[in-house]
Image (cartoon, rainbow, N blue to C red):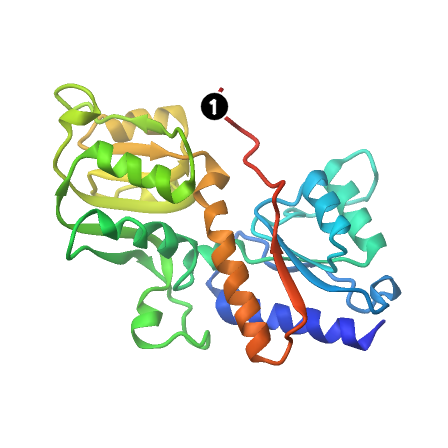
């Protein structure tokens, strides 16, 4: 095992843990180092120091990472996620695990630790909505009880937890919120569940003051939230019907589209931390082939 390679990979993981402390992750999640080859001879050598960031670890993004000679893959969504009783090439996840292990690639996932951390995915989504109206603010929907020891203190500690509630300084229209979500995510289209209290189409909803936000699959966090609009990645059909039967409209981006736009921020922060700690030759790159598996055609 090459000690130079070991140092930068371990330092990158240390930096990620400081940005998104793993204790903030949900109890059901699988975060941290998922495939550990740091003591594997396959990592040896003096090749380029490349950390590769993707929203999902697929065979396509793995090919891209390997073409860039990455030895660390940071995948927002954990893969593998569940336990496995055997490893074989007939299963796609097992196949990816075997290829990473054989190539000496370390795989790390921050997932819900990144959602819940101050400055993470949910803050990125919520803070992007503040420009809709002056004097707007955000607060955590479910504050974390596991902040002690994370390094977050004071106001930053108070920003750790699940979901965000955006309170606008003045009312805006529903189309204005839809347009801002499209701008944030870079999407041409989103799915909209319109509240049944609307007198006509979306343009008839002009009194949006509260927007509840949760990246990914947000129902578990947003359920019971009183807001004019929910913004999340995905929800089930009957759940949308139940929410829109009241005064709330729902904006759905598709799951990973509510997360992927944050990755350049993650990459920039990781690169800055590595440089500040003396690791100036590590390239932190974001996948260009990663994409949501669903598209509107």
Q: Count neighbours of disc 1 (C-alpha within 10 A) and say few if under 14, some if 14 to 19, many if 20 or more.
A: few
Secondary structure beneath dot 1 equals loop
Examine the rendering and report whether any part of residue 67 can be seen. yes
Tell me the residue at 37%/46% (across/down).
214
Q: Which residue is mark 1?
A: 296
Quadrant where the image shows the N terminus: bottom right
Classify 279 as above or below 269: below
Which is more toward the observer, 235 or 278?
A: 278
Examine the rendering and report whether any part of residue 26 can be seen. no
Farthest front residue in view: 281
Q: Quadrant of residue 59?
A: top right
Residue 23 at x, y = what percent? 50, 66
Classify 119 as above or below 28: below
Tell me the residue at 32%/46% (across/down).
213
Residue 168 at x, y = what percent? 17, 50
Farthest right residue in view: 41
Relative placement, left or right, of 168 versus 191 is: left
Tell me the residue at 15%/24% (across/down).
198
């Amino acid at each position: 095992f090459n000690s130079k390679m070991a140092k930068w990979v371990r330092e990158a993981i240390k930096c990620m843990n400081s940005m998104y402390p793993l204790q903030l992750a949900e109890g059901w999640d699988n975060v941290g180092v998922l495939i550990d080859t740091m003591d594997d001879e396959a990592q040896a050598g003096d090749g380029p120091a490349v950390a590769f960031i993707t929203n999902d670890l697929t065979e396509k993004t793995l090919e891209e990472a390997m073409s860039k000679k990455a030895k660390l893959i940071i995948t927002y969504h954990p893969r593998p996620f569940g336990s496995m009783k055997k490893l074989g090439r007939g299963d796609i996840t097992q196949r990816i695990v075997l290829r990473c292990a054989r190539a000496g690639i370390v795989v790390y996932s921050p997932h819900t630790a990144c959602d819940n951390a101050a400055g993470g995915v949910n803050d990125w989504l919520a803070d992007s909505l503040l420009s809709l109206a002056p004097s707007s603010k955000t607060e955590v929907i479910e504050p974390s009880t596991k902040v002690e020891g994370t390094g977050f203190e004071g106001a930053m500690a108070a920003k750790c937890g699940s979901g965000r509630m955006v309170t606008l300084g003045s009312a805006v229209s529903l189309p204005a919120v839809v347009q801002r979500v499209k701008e944030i995510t870079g999407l041409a289209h989103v799915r909209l569940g319109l509240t049944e209290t609307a007198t006509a189409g979306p343009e008839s909803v002009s009194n949006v003051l509260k927007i509840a936000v949760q990246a990914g699959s947000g129902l578990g966090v947003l359920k019971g939230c009183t807001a004019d609009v929910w913004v999340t990645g995905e929800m089930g059909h009957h759940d949308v019907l139940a929410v829109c039967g009241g005064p709330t409209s729902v904006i759905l981006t598709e799951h990973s589209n509510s997360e992927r736009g944050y990755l350049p921020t993650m990459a920039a922060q990781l690169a800055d931390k590595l440089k500040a700690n003396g690791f100036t030759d590590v390239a932190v790159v974001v996948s260009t082939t990663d994409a949501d598996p669903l598209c509107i055609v």
